[in-house]
Image (cartoon, grey):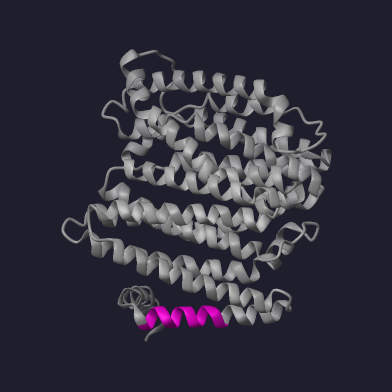
Amino acid sequence: MLLRNIIFARFLSPGDFAIALTFGVVLSLFEYTSNFGHENLMQRSSVGNQPSFQATMHSAMIIRAIAVASLIVVISPFIPSILNLGDVKFNYALLAIVPLVNGFSHLDHQRFHRRQFYTVSAKIGLTADLLSVLVAVVCVAIWDSYWAFYASFLFRHTTSTLLSHLWARRPYALAFNIKHLKLLLKFGVPLLIVGLLKYIGIEMDKAIVARFVGLDSFTTYVLTVLIVVNGANFVTVALSKIFIRRVSIAKTHIAETVKTNGIINCFLVIPILVVLGILGEDLMSLIFGLQYTRAPFLIVAVCAIVGLRALNQWLNQTVIASAPTQLMLMADISRVIGAIFGVWLVYTSGDLLKITMAFWFAEILYFITLTLLLQKRFAILKTSISILCIYLVCLSGLLWVYNTSHLSSELVKIGLTLATLSLFYLAFLVFSETCRSQSMALLRPIMIRLGF
């Protein structure tokens, strides 16, 4: 949660906070590469509502938790050297407690998703997050080291597990139904491969930066990603379900619907990235404190990656709604190849910006690959080229504005941000019928209320 990270960034030393951030890097590896998708299977399977199925999934979660925890304990002595952390006193074997606690969660709130009922899941997540923020304040008052982060981190996961039992409607049960286990393996094994590919393509950048650039740059990089991703997620998360639904019901005009989705995606996401690209460094200093070193042009590079991932998410939504999901697996493979090749070219330089751009190159490969695969099913190539050109033009403009203003005062930056946004919206409203109609649909109720 962003608020909890702000507290620790403010009250811990940069060195201790850097060690704390590596906890997420380590655990995300095992989360990506051990997730069988039991929650999704429960929602999609025709037997997902059966008590025996749910009980079998509980058993599978415990087995997975024990396996992951054991593996973390085994590799824990090597983690500091893998991440180039130097002499760290924290025993990474303690991270094994987190997946172990998560493994005993109750899945009843996931079963409710079958009926499009998400209230219980939201209550669990929100309550656990809010309580963990309060605990974070207490922890930093007791410890002034990464132990405060670890205690709050463990509390958050423990609370989430306990609340899943408290708000469950069925009693917790375990079972070993062979039929259900086979169904889980058939559904989940391909997801393990996808998880590994996604970790390498999307999450491994943090580990690469820690190992080859150093902890100071690692902290700066993670905080930059954190603020940009959270900003973009205000739009992308909301758009995801809407876009999938729009494409899934478009029987004879899929290509036109996909084009409209892409234009709307650019219209809503790019302005956020423009604001963060120009003002992001000052926002980071304001939110996280002045103790974290700025890396020139890093904020623009991260905005470039996050923006391209938003475009890739637009393509992913198209696949989910209208095409076999194996297409995303093939695109993931191209992204991994691009990431490995890019990092291999630049890792010896120890240059944070070059390593960041290696992962941007990987996102470009993903976009191109998935576009070409979708083109075999319906006409999307022209739309993808148009969307990519819009993105590149906006990115070039952002780069120019940043280069012009990054040493200027905050007032100058705010003025340039407003001018850039005005120019952006004006261009979209002039050249895009979709943006004009969507803007009018948004403004019309407001104008009516104001009496116009």
Work out whether residue 243 can be spotted: yes
Residue 43: percent from left, percent from top:
34, 34
For residue 144, above or below residue 269: above
**Residue 382: in magenta span:** no
Q: Residue at x 70, y 65 (%)?
A: 296
Q: Residue at x 57, y 42 (%)?
A: 127
Give 388 or 419, whichever is nearer the viewer. 388
**Residue 424: in magenta span:** yes
Residue 188: percent from left, percent from top:
39, 28
Q: Quadrant of the C terminus?
A: bottom left
Question: Within the image, what quadrant is residue 130 found in?
Answer: top right
Question: Within the image, what quadrant is residue 311 found in?
Answer: bottom left
Q: Residue at x 74, y 45 (%)?
A: 18
Give 345 or 118, whichever is nearer the viewer. 345
For residue 407, above or below residue 33: below
Give the extent of the magenta segment.
419-430
Residue 160: percent from left, percent from top:
56, 34
For residue 117, above or below residue 426: above
Question: Within the image, what quadrant is residue 257 found in?
Answer: bottom left
Number of numbered discs on residues: 0
Looking at the image, residue 119 sits to the left or right of residue 154; the answer is left
Q: Residue at x 45, y 68 (%)?
A: 391
For residue 60, above or below residue 258: above
- State the predominant SS element of the stretch in magenta: helix
Give 319 or 342, whichever is nearer the viewer. 342
